[in-house]
Image (cartoon, rainbow, N blue to C red):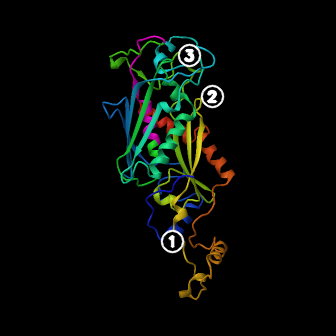
Amino acid sequence: MAPSQAAHVNLSPAELSFLRATLSQTPPIRLDHTKGPKDFRSMRAEYDVLPSANGSARIALEDGTEALVGVKAEVEKSQWRPTPGGEASIPTVATVATAEVEDTEDDSRGKGQNAWIEMSVEIPGFREDDSLPVFLSSMLTESLLASGELKDRLYINTRFHWKLYIDILLLSPPLSYPLALLSMATHLALLTSRLPALKSEKDEDPLFDDDWDASVPLYPKNKGKASADNQIDKPPVIVLAMAVGNNIIFDPCKEELAVADAVLAIACASSKSSPTGARVVSIRTIDPPSHLTPPGIPDSMNSATGGKVPSSSADALTQRELLANSGVWTPPRGGMKRGLISQVVKMVVENGGVAEEVISALQAIEVG
C-alpha cells in the first residue's frame, strides 16, 4: 500500500459530501466540468532541455506542477557471471546499427541487470528518505524493469555495460499526486535519449564515435524487414485511476482524490501483438487522502441538535455505518472490488483506450 498524499485538502465534511455526490452521478460532474471521466489535464512538454544529458524532458501541467527529468549514461565494468547458451547476442544499443541491416536478430534475453538503472526523485519540502519520494522512485523503477527491455539494451559486451542514471526533479510543490506526471516525463526523456555509437567489436574495451550526430537512440524507431517481429517496447507510462461509487475517473486532481474510494496506479506499455493496443506492466494501489479526512457529525449523534452522543468509538462506528447513505460525509473504508479493477484495466488496455491515447500523444512529441 502506497503512502497517502502529503498535502491534504482543507475541505469541510459538507464540501466533501457534496463533491462525492457530484462525482457519483451518471455521468460524473468533475470540478472542471468541461472534462469527462477519461479526460486528462492539459500539459506543455518539451525535450532536450539539458544539453549535458543523454536525454531530458520537461512537462508542466495546467495547475502549475512541473517535472524535469535528466538521463545520464556512463560506462562501467560488468561483474562476470556465467550465462547459459554461450555467446548468444541480444539487440542492444551497441548493435542496433548492425541489426537494422540484418534480416534476423537473436531474441535471447537476460543479460541486463537491475543494478544498471539507478533512479532518484527530488520533491521540494521532502527529504530523500521520506516515504513519498522513496515510493515514487520504487514505483517508477519497477515499471521500467518489469519488461527487461531497457536493462538488456544497456549491455555492451561481457566486460562492460552502460550505467543509466535517471534524475527526476519536481520543480514545484506537488499540487496533486505526482506519480503520473513523473512517469510521463521519464517516458519522454528515455524516448529522446541517445548513446554514442560503438566502434569496437565483441569483448574489446569500448571505443565510441566522437561524432554525436552518429549517436544511437536508446529506443530506436522500428524500421526494416524484421521490425514487425522484433518490435521494441517503449518505456511504460503510469496512469492514475480512481473509483467513486461505480464511476471510474482518470487523472484525478487533489480535491477529487479527497473523496476517492480507491486509487490504482497502472503501468502500461505498447503491446507487441497489436500496434494499437497496450499491455499492463504492473498495478499498485495508492492509499487516498480520503481515508484521513474528518467525518461529518449527523444530527442523531450531535447533542446540540437533540441527538445522543455515542458512548464509545465502537458505538459511533456502528451508527456511522447505518448512516452511510444519509448524505453525511464518512471516510471510505476498504479497497476496490475485483470487478471494478477488471473494468479499469479494460478501459486502459483496450484498443483506443486510455493507455493508447497517452502513449501516442507522448510519441507524437518525440520528433528526433
Quarter of the rendering containing residue 26: bottom right
Give the magenta range: 183-202
Q: Residue at x 47, y 47 (%)?
A: 134
Decide: is 99 above or below 323: above
Which amino acid type corresponds to the residue marked 1 in the rendered image? Pro
Which amino acid type corresponds to the residue marked 3 in the rendered image? Ser
Decide: is 55 above or below 250: above
Q: Earlier in the sequence, mark 3 or mark 1?
A: 1
Q: Residue at x 36, y 37 (%)?
A: 46
- From mark 3 to mark 1, how far is it between C-alphas? 61 Å
Work out whether residue 179 can be spotted: no
Work out whether residue 143 can be spotted: yes
Image-based side of 167 in relation to 347, left or right: left
Residue corresponding to mark 3: 89
Q: Secondary structure at mark 3?
A: loop
Report the mark closest to the observer, 1 or 2: 1
Residue corresponding to mark 1: 13
Give neighbour class at mark 1: few <14, some 14-19, many 20+ (Cα, 10 Å): some
